[in-house]
Image: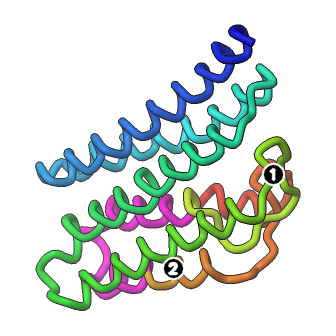
């Protein structure tokens, strides 16, 4: 029993590091260090991919771990990119800029909630229902990095488009697959 408890600690520690990276990204955004904020979210994406691998490798999957992962995704791929995009690109554009990132955040939370209600903590689905939140966050990060080369209206459209894609019922291949859709989502 004790060894199982310690095995569960490993993937949860990776998830906790994801939470820390997401929070530190928000701190970097508040300090107007936007590139640092993006790189911290890239670290969060990497940690998000690792926690499940570690859990399955150690046979330490759990409902607690699934819930913790969902909360970390809400922070690192919902709140953090929304704040980062708002402060880097949309702060000076009034209510429209604020509304765009709030809609993105609410869609991310909705997508994560729907995923939790429909998934099994011990299984990996072959298809996803809507665009995964980390993929949408990747496009938000890319928008932040390209902020000096795109009109601000693009920075408003990106979170709104991905909000719709996250809550859509598009059946997309899981990112573990090897196909054109997976490659396109990862390149994005």
Q: How crowded is mark 2: few (under 14 residues within 10 Å), some or many (20 or more)?
A: many
Looking at this view, is 182 or 12 the one in front? 12
Q: In this view, does 181 lie to the left or right of 68?
A: right
Q: Is residue 50 above or below residue 70?
A: above
Lower position in the chain sequence, tag 1 or tag 2: 1
Dominant secondary structure (helix, strand or loop) of the stretch shown in magenta: helix
Which residue is nearer to you in this view: 156 or 44?
A: 44
**Residue 95 place in picture, x, y as percent:** 19, 90
| 69 versus 94 height, above or below | above
Taking the view exactly as shown, the residue that stands out farthest to the top is 3
> Magenta stretch?
136-159
Give the residue displayed 66% in from the left and 62% down from the top. 185
Q: Is mark 1 on a helix, strand or loop?
A: loop
- Residue at the image position 25 percent from the left and 83 percent from the top: 97
Q: Mark 1 points at which residue?
A: 120
- As helix, strand or loop, the secondary structure at mark 2 comes to helix
Query: Looking at the picture, does residue 109 appear above or below residue 14?
Result: below
- Residue that mark 2 sits on: 163
**Residue 168: x %, y % from top left:** 67, 83
Q: Is 54 in front, or is 43?
A: 54
- Would residue 168 be counted in the magenta stretch? no
Q: How far across and how far down the image is residue 36, in percent?
A: 27, 43
The quarter of the picture where the C terminus appears is: bottom right
* Residue 147 lies in the magenta-colored region: yes
Location of residue 89 by image quarter: bottom left
Q: Distance between the residues labelled 1 and 2?
A: 24 Å
Residue 105 location, x and y as percent?
A: 41, 71
Q: In this view, does 69 lie to the left or right of 29?
A: right
Q: Are marks 1 and 2 in contact (CB under 8 Å)?
A: no
| Residue displayed at 18% across by 48% down | 33
């Amino acid at each position: 029993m004790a060894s199982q408890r310690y095995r569960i600690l490993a993937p949860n520690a990776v998830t906790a590091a994801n939470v820390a990276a997401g929070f530190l990204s928000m701190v970097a955004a508040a300090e107007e260090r936007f590139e640092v904020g993006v790189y911290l979210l890239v670290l969060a994406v990497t940690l998000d991919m690792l926690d499940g691998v570690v859990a399955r490798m150690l046979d330490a999957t759990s409902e607690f771990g699934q819930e913790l992962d969902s909360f970390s995704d809400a922070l690192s791929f919902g709140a953090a990119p929304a704040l980062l995009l708002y402060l880097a690109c949309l702060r000076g554009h009034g209510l429209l800029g604020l509304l765009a990132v709030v809609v993105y955040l609410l869609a991310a939370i909705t997508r994560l909630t729907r995923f939790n209600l429909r998934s099994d903590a011990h299984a990996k689905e072959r298809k996803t229902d809507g665009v995964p939140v980390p993929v949408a966050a990747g496009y938000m990060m890319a928008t932040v990095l390209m902020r000096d080369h795109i009109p601000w209206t693009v920075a408003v459209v990106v979170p709104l488009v991905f909000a719709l894609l996250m809550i859509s019922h598009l059946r997309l291949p899981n990112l573990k697959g090897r196909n054109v859709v997976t490659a396109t989502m990862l390149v994005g």
